[in-house]
Image (cartoon, coloured by chain):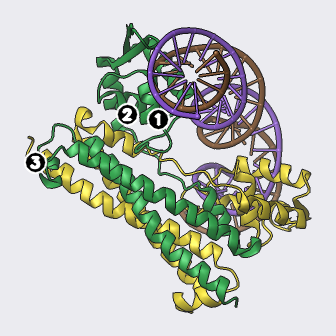
Chain colours: A green, B yellow, C purple, D brown
Amino acid sequence: MALREAVLAALLEGEASGYDLAKRFDAGVANFWSATPQQLYRELERLEGEGLLSARVVRQERRPDKRLFTVTEAGREVLRSFSHQPSRPTAIRDDLLVKLQAADETGLDAVITALEQRMELCRAKLERYDRLAERMRGGLDEERYLREAERVGPYLTLQRGRSHEQENLRWGAATLAVLERRRAEPR
Amino acid sequence: MALREAVLAALLEGEASGYDLAKRFDAGVANFWSATPQQLYRELERLEGEGLLSARVVRQERRPDKRLFTVTEAGREVLRSFSHQPSRPTAIRDDLLVKLQAADETGLDAVITALEQRMELCRAKLERYDRLAERMRGGLDEERYLREAERVGPYLTLQRGRSHEQENLRWGAATLAVLERRRAEPR
DNA sequence: AGCACCTATTCAAAAAGTTGCATAAGGGGA
DNA sequence: TCCCCTTATGCAACTTTTTGAATAGGTGCT
């Protein structure tokens, strides 16, 4: 149910089209929520209908026209009220962990491969996050940025994404070591 | 789509009823997948229908009867084939992060409270994971357990849960510090 | 005796999310 | 020129997940 609020929150960073949002919410980049383009277009429609967003059409010469959305005062109010509601704890749901859970039965090889692939992805994501963070800070060191910047929310959520990937790598390396050892020396 | 496989994987640890599974898959405890009782009962039906599980009814004296499920050879085969399929990367979806993303607009107080509550939950979960891990090891030190135990999958997924909560706490503390400082000294 | 809670399962309905496709215009490379 | 990619949006069908019950016997507490 937080897709509404996630869209509003994302639009606080500035006017955007559905397409722009789709990129921010792409599962591969999203640092605080993920969603598909279809979900976003539907949600934008709804939010506009409820008066939480206002839209304006921008005619473009060499591109299809696009609709840019902005959060209205009513939208901001929804966010304020949302921030007071209890957050539900997040649940783990990861294909890879299911495979690992069953690994003793299914054989270690496939899981080792899957883990290696996942870690490669994590590394790529981590680098991307680092570049993004650097661009956000715009020359300032982190300490100063966090004290002086106008908005820190987006930076802090980005750091959560970063820390998640980093921890994935740390755990992944340890797990890989265990699995490879057991493959080499079965009990 | 991995609920099927998650149920099969969970049942590798031994025969269980829907009710038993519901406890293992509870969002507050689940270390490799989470699901509600309703999802599980439906999935158990389906899996039995497909011959991936077999069920037997156990009459009980002072409790309602229950149905205990076991993974069949066909079920194990499904798991084996699943372990070779590509895993989709996980996406972040967390209420709390949405609030944090919007925090500069909505005010810091509510988010600080939410973060503190979340961290309290994390601490509780971490302790529970630690007790679970200790019980799994059954006296052995981790190093030896991981080398000699018959099955390590469940232990390794538990460790992922643990590392996730720990990282949540680490990041949470740092984030809290930033937010509290900004609350005390607004730019 | 009454109440709250635990075991054990199931139904119905709504909300949320995914998948596949369709449109439409322009850009870039073989 | 043909094909594929990017921008930009949308529909329809489908699956998955969540929510909110209802049932039914038993335990423990006051």
* Coordinates of residue A186 in the picture (x, y in percent): 70, 88
Where B57 sits versus A14, above or below?
A: below
Q: Quadrant of the C terminus of chain B?
A: top left
Amino acid type, callout 2? Phe
**Label 1 SS:** loop
- In this orientation, which residue lies closer to the viewer: B78 or B178? B78
Instruction: Work out whether residue B68 can be spotted.
Output: no
* Coordinates of residue A88 in the picture (x, y in percent): 47, 47
The residue tagged 1 is: A2
Amino acid type, callout 3? Ala
Amino acid type, callout 1? Ala
- The image quadrant of residue A60 is top left
Of all chains, the one bearing label 1 is A
**Label 3 SS:** helix
- In this orientation, which residue lies closer to the viewer: A145 or C23? C23
Q: Which mark is residue A82?
A: 2
Are callouts 3 and 1 both on one chain? Answer: no
The residue tagged 3 is: B184
Where B134 sits versus A165, above or below?
A: below
Q: Residue at x 84, y 67 (%)?
A: B70
